[in-house]
Image: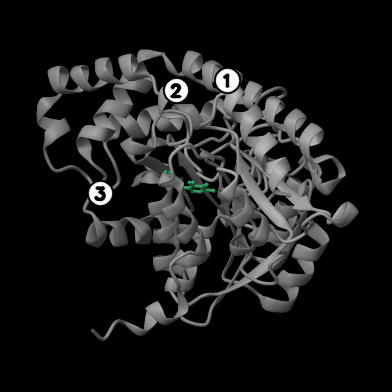
């Protein structure tokens, strides 16, 4: 077969190879990026889907508008307003997961050879998706508080990117949250360099203690001229259900129109049944309890994992305790002759029946081989303790 040349830029992820081993019996996996299936509000979703079929069977089962199902757009606009983002229902489109929003951004904005700046590390599928459209993906370094804005400025000035893509709240894989001042700085940079900034925010609602700072888009009202330079991607995947495939995008009108046109050729619209179900669910008023529950359960798991890592790996590992999201991002120090290469540790860990993802593939450039990502979302407290103890033995 002769495949399109755009595929030359993209490899299947190294992580996939590791995932093949996850079927090994008895393995405890911290490798996935999934929420816990046991946390899904099955009752609430059953009611919502039944209501969708009872009250609006025609709409829920018929073809629908590419922009999204109106009642859901209205609910999502209200959700966003609750987070300080002023948006009308017509100012957002529903996407098939936020992954599709990223794909539409790639499709509408990237010509071969264009430069895009992302965080180093960032969400692997984003790197792959942007490369598929021919982007040169440039990595802006992060610290424990997300992207370093001075470095970001230097890179923007040097490369004049088509856009900057950030996951500023409980990043994947970094777990890091950009502080208020840096968020404002990002907005100032958008204005100063007239650069579009894409804010990907699937984890913002998943905080364990204090709420994170307002989203970059919510802060745009404080920085004149910035709102028209921000695109925002949201998702119900991590808090409600990824199988619903409900995401959304808010963007300047011109960009939203082009993205809608591309979506039309891609999947015509997001499943109307899923959209009607999501709309009923949001209308039912169950979301606050669902959020309180996931915050509590994942918060306990994150605290347990942090304490176990300290106890079992000591100075062989460094990390910042995440305040939300699904991930620990950690770095092997190599102290006392322990392993400093996460790929080597990943293989040894599998022998000990515990899995995590090495960090290198999350870097678009200059991978840091000592880094790793551990998800605390899907294992219960006992499994977390046991899994981290096994990791300690693998070191
Ligand atoms: C940062 C980030 N963006 C987007 C996605 C895609 O999520 P979905 O398409 O399920 O909304 C994920 C999923 O892991 C993610 O971590």
Q: Residue furthest right?
A: 336
- Residue 66, disc: 3
Does mark 3's beta carbon lie closer than 8 Å to ligand 1?
no
Q: Earlier in the sequence, mark 1 or mark 3?
A: 3
Q: Locate the N terminus and report the quarter of the image it occupies.
A: bottom left
In this picture, is 227 found above or below 127?
above
Q: Earlier in the sequence, mark 2 or mark 1?
A: 2
Residue 114 drawn at (x, y percent): 54, 78
Cβ atoms at labels 2 and 1 below 8 Å apart: yes
Secondary structure beneath dot 1 equals helix
Residue 108 drawn at (x, y percent): 41, 66
Q: Earlier in the sequence, mark 2 or mark 3?
A: 2
- Mark 2 = which residue? 39
Viewer-side residue, 34 vs 390: 390
Residue 143 drawn at (x, y percent): 79, 52
Please rate how many residues cluster around mark 3, counting C-alpha atoms within 10 Å: few if below 14, some from 14 to 19, many from 20.
many
Residue 57 drawn at (x, y percent): 11, 26
Viewer-side residue, 97 vs 42: 42
Question: Residue at position x 53%, y 35% from top?
Answer: 86
Cβ atoms at labels 2 and 3 below 8 Å apart: no
In this picture, is 74 found above or below 357?
above
Occupied quadrant, residue 264: bottom left
In this picture, is 115 found above or below 237?
below
- Mark 1 = which residue? 297
């Amino acid at each position: 077969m002769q495949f399109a040349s755009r595929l030359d830029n993209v490899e299947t992820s190294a992580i996939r190879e590791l995932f093949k081993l996850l079927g090994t019996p008895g393995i405890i996996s911290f490798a996935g990026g999934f929420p816990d299936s046991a946390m899904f509000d099955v009752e609430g979703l059953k009611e919502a889907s039944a209501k969708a079929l009872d009250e609006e069977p025609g709409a829920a089962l018929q073809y629908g508008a590419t922009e999204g199902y109106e009642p859901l757009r209205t609910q999502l606009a209200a959700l966003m307003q609750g987070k300080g983002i002023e948006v009308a229902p017509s100012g957002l489109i529903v996407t098939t997961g936020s992954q599709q929003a990223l794909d539409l951004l790639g499709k509408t904005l990237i010509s071969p050879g264009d430069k895009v700046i992302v965080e180093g590390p960032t969400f692997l599928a984003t790197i792959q998706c942007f490369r598929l459209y021919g982007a040169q993906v440039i990595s802006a370094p992060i610290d424990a508080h997300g992207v370093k804005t001075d470095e970001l400025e230097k890179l923007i000035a040097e490369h004049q990117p088509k856009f900057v893509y950030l996951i500023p709240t409980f990043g994947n894989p970094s777990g890091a949250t950009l502080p208020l001042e840096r968020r404002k700085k990002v907005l100032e940079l958008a204005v100063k360099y007239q650069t579009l900034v894409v804010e990907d925010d699937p984890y913002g609602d998943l905080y364990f203690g204090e709420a994170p700072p307002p989203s970059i888009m919510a802060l745009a009202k404080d920085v004149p001229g910035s709102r028209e330079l921000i695109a925002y991607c949201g998702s119900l995947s991590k808090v409600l259900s990824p199988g619903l495939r409900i995401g959304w995008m808010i963007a300047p009108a011109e960009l939203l129109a082009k993205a809608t046109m591309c979506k039309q050729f891609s999947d015509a619209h997001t499943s109307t049944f899923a959209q009607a179900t999501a709309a009923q669910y949001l209308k039912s008023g169950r979301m606050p309890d669902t959020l309180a529950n996931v915050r509590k359960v994942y918060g306990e798991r994150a605290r347990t994992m942090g304490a176990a890592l300290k106890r079992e790996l000591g100075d062989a590992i460094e990390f910042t305790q995440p305040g939300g999201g699904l991930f620990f991002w950690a770095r092997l120090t190599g102290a006392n002759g322990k392993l400093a290469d996460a790929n080597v540790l990943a293989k040894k860990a599998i022998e000990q029946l515990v899995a995590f993802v090495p960090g290198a593939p999350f870097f678009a450039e200059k991978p840091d081989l000592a880094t790793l990502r551990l998800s605390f979302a899907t294992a219960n407290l006992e499994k977390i303790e046991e899994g981290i103890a096994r990791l300690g033995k693998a070191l």
